[in-house]
């Protein structure tokens, strides 16, 4: 059977929704994003067809200059293990390259054996593991934060210096996440987070007030999903620094009546333990970020 890959058409909708109906026990998110994806200026959906009928899709966006993000790979259940996902990914990568991308990334859940096997055959390498810790209805901790506050604009440079020598930053492959996409975290991003008042720092009083922790946050989930929630995009520091920053964040969220915190962090034990101590719940699986130079 010959596999043909082309850009998605609005008329693919019904066939695609039909084979995505039972992707997971709860269904799939593809129907919620389909219209948006097809209208994007910085992305494309590619569809594989056999005898003219859609049998697979994947989505690619150039979120940040030079960086492609692949998502939404789906192959109709009866057509799996025939090279369809690989053929679509190939097209996505060609498109990304033509748009100037030098690196492509994607995420899979640690328990998705098929996806992990498939991306590894395409030469994607795992570079980082993130965890989505969640905290419902944050209330003030009994003990308040003692050493954390929002970073000031003038501090962007020292925040960046902190990251440059950070082990967690290396473990996170220098990445942060917003809305389930992962991006490189560079000096400019740090400046933006700080300027927008979205960077919490922890100061080490015993070491002349040096920065010993950093938490970057985003309210994008609120805007995107119309809920009063907040996410962390990147967390860095030892157990005590993270504990203190998390107390600060909880107090901020309690004050703002935030209903839920999506606590994304690189899977670094002291960070997870500190968040758990403050009531954050760990997920059943972790998020593995894969990367490939293109
Ligand atoms: C993951 C998924 C997209 C793979 O699609 P596919 O069209 O079957 O993938 P391919 O045929 O291109 O697979 C290429 C290679 O990946 C590996 N692979 C794919 N599925 C596998 C599985 N279930 N078990 C083991 N290896 C697998 C194999 O090495 C395969 O080559 P082979 O068949 O010659 O051995 C498909 O299983 C799917 O739609 N799953 C549900 C949705 C999903 O999990 N999407 C990914 C989210 S990150």
Image (cartoon, grey):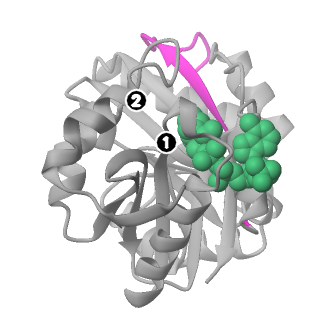
Q: Residue at x 48, y 81 (%)?
A: 94
Q: Quadrant of ligand 1?
A: top right
Does residue 231 appear in the picture of this structure? yes
| Quarter of the view holding residue 273 | top right
Residue nearer the viewer, 58 or 171: 58
Q: Residue at x 49, y 25 (%)?
A: 23
Ligand 1 lies under 8 Å from the Cβ of mark 1: yes
Q: Is residue 107 left or right of residue 189?
A: right
The N terminus - image quarter = bottom right
Against 151, residue 15 (above or below) is above
Q: Is residue 107 left or right of residue 119?
A: left
Number of numbered markers:
2
| Quarter of the view holding residue 275 | top right
Secondary structure category for the residue under label 1? strand
Alpha-carbon neighbours of circle 1 within 10 Å: few (<14), some, or many (≥20)? many
Q: Residue at x 62, y 40 (%)?
A: 80
Ligand 1 lies under 8 Å from the Cβ of mark 2: no
Q: Measure the C-alpha gap from mark 1 to mark 2.
A: 7 Å
Residue at numbered disc 2: 20
Residue at numbered disc 1: 74
Does the residue at mark 1 contact the one at mark 2 (Cβ under 8 Å)?
yes
Residue nearer the viewer, 207 or 66: 66
Secondary structure category for the residue under label 2? helix
Residue stretch in magenta: 124-145
């Amino acid at each position: 059977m010959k596999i043909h890959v082309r850009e998605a058409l609005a008329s693919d909708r019904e066939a695609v929704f039909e084979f995505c109906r039972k992707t997971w026990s709860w269904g799939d998110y593809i129907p919620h994003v389909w219209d948006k994806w097809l209208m994007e200026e910085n992305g494309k959906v590619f569809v594989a067809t056999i005898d003219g009928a859609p049998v697979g899709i994947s989505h690619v966006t150039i979120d940040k200059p030079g960086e492609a993000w692949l998502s939404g790979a789906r192959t109709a259940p009866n057509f799996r293990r025939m090279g369809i996902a690989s053929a679509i990914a190939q097209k996505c990568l060609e498109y990304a390259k033509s748009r100037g991308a030098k690196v492509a990334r994607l995420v899979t859940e640690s328990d998705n054996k098929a996806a992990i096997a498939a991306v590894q055959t395409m030469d994607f390498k795992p570079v980082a593991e993130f965890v989505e810790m969640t905290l419902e209805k944050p209330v003030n901790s009994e003990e308040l934060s003692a050493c954390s506050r929002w970073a000031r604009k003038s501090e962007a440079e020292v925040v960046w210096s902190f990251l440059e020598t950070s082990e967690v930053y290396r473990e996170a492959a220098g990445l942060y996440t917003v809305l389930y996409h992962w991006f490189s975290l560079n000096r400019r991003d740090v400046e933006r987070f700080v300027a927008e008042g979205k960077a919490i720092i922890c100061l080490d009083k015993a070491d002349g007030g040096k920065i010993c922790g950093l938490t970057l946050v985003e309210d994008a989930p609120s805007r995107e999903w119309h809920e009063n929630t907040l996410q962390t995009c990147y967390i860095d520091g030892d157990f005590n620094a993270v504990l203190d920053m998390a107390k600060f964040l909880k107090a901020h969220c309690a004050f703002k009546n935030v209903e839920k915190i999506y606590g994304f962090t690189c899977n670094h034990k002291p960070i997870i333990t500190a968040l758990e101590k403050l009531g954050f719940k760990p997920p059943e699986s972790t998020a593995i970020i894969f990367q490939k130079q293109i």
